[in-house]
Amino acid sequence: RHRDRHAEQSHHGRRREDSDQEEPRGTLVPLLDGHQVVVAADPESQLVLGLRDALRRAGATVTDDATADAAMLQVVSERWGETPISIDQFGRSQEFTLRYAVIFRLQRADGTDLVPQQAIELSRDYISVPTRSAGTEGEREILARELRREMLSGGLRRVDAVSRLSQAEGATP
């Protein structure tokens, strides 16, 4: 069993609670359709691999050539953390919060910000009974996969919102 607690935090420090709504199907990031995008981050990161795939599906050409005339999606930081939030009568941790925070930005080919640097933080609480350690790591890994998937969707939603606004104003990446 686990409790969901989602919070997104912008670069201004405001928090908003997020719901478990499914991502709408359709083309995200229409402004990047047909343009080159460089994803600057750890190439082994599961989040980065997901971002590359999602951008390709959206019609962008993902390249590793940082010298190309391309927009740059930069994952500045990707951090995981786990904090005990309750203990049993013997002082053993039994409930934890798993946190996942990413700082990113998207720049146009000319170096100006399309999506200014900002952070998204997600967290989930889960129970780990100290006397029953079997299966605990499996639950944590399932939650980590869910958080990674939600982080990908949250980041793409932010890029999508800005790209739709820019497209309405006639800007290009």
Image (cartoon, rainbow, N blue to C red):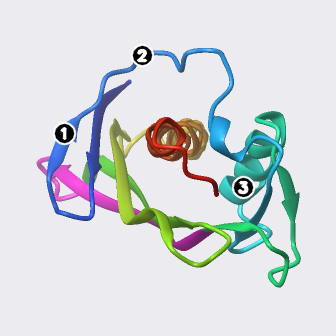
Residue at point 78% right, 54% down? Answer: 49
- Badge 1 is on which residue? 16
Residue at point 85% right, 76% down? Answer: 68
- Badge 2 is on which residue? 21
Q: Is residue 60 visible?
A: yes
Q: Type of residue at label 1?
A: Arg
Q: Disc 3 vs disc 1: Cβ atoms closer than 8 Å? A: no
Q: Is residue 139 visible?
A: no
Q: Type of residue at label 3?
A: Gln
Marks 3 and 2 sit apart, C-alpha to C-alpha, by: 22 Å
Disc 1 packing (10 Å; few <14; some 14–19; many ≥20): few
Quadrant that contains the N terminus: top left
Magenta highlight: main SS: strand
Q: Is residue 85 left or right of residue 128?
A: left
Marks 3 and 1 sit apart, C-alpha to C-alpha, by: 25 Å
Disc 2 packing (10 Å; few <14; some 14–19; many ≥20): few
Q: Which x, y percent locates residue 36? A: 82, 59
- N-terminal label among 3 and 2: 2
- N-terminal label among 2 and 1: 1
Foreground mark, 3 or 1?
1
Q: Nearer the viewer, residue 167 or 87?
A: 167
Q: Nearer the viewer, residue 115 or 14?
A: 115
Residue at point 68% right, 74% down? Answer: 41
Q: Which range of residues does the magenta coloring cover?
A: 74-92
Q: Which structural element holds mark 2?
A: loop
Q: Which x, y percent locates residue 130? A: 36, 46
